[in-house]
Image (tube, helix red, strand yellow):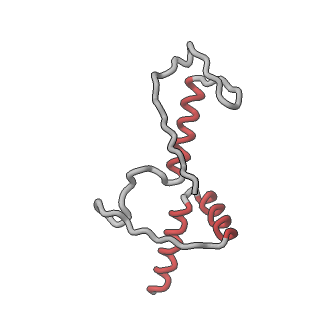
Amino acid sequence: MARKTKTEYVVGPDLGLDEEEFILKDGRRLTNELADEIANEMLAEVRRRNLIPGGKSLSGGSVHSPRVQFRVPEELRAQAERVAEDEGVSLSALARHALEDYVRSRAS
């Protein structure tokens, strides 16, 4: 099995985008305004996907939350991804809510 190589990123000094020209892959010049827009879009996307590192434990306190994994057919996963996107939640959050609803309905 091929090993994934870890990419190392080096953070250099800030660019003076008003003085220095930086061209994006799509051909647009990166400006301070565009950099802010891209940063805000990325932050919103990360938050939308609930990928904020160091989020609160679902079990409370500093305890790691237990993990549940299961396999599903491709079509069910595709449908679930569409629903999650429509609802603005991660696939994990959608699955967690579905499991909570199912267990709650069985307990009644």
Residue 30 position, x and y percent, is: 61, 25
Q: Which of the image's four quarters has the N terminus?
A: bottom right
Residue found 57% across the figure and 33% down from its top: 37
Position in image of residue 59 (x %, y %) = 34, 66
Residue at 47% x, 22% y: name it. Answer: 14
Farthest residue toward the left? 61
Looking at the image, the residue that sits furthest to the top is 19
Viewer-closest of 22 and 103: 22
Above or below — where is 29 with respect to 67? Answer: above
Between 73 and 34, which is closer to the camera in this rendering? 73
| Residue 62 as seen in the image, left or right of residue 98 | left
The residue at 50%/70% (across/down) is 69
- The C terminus appears in which quarter of the rendering? bottom left
Q: Residue furthest front?
A: 1
Give the total of numbered labels.
0
Q: Is residue 81 left or right of residue 66?
A: right
Q: Residue at x 46, y 80 (%)?
A: 104
Measured along the vertical axis of the image, is residue 20 above or below residue 39? above
Q: Position of residue 23 (x, y in %)?
A: 65, 24
Image vertical order of residue 31 relative to residue 89, above or below? above
Picture layout, residue 67 above or below residue 54: below
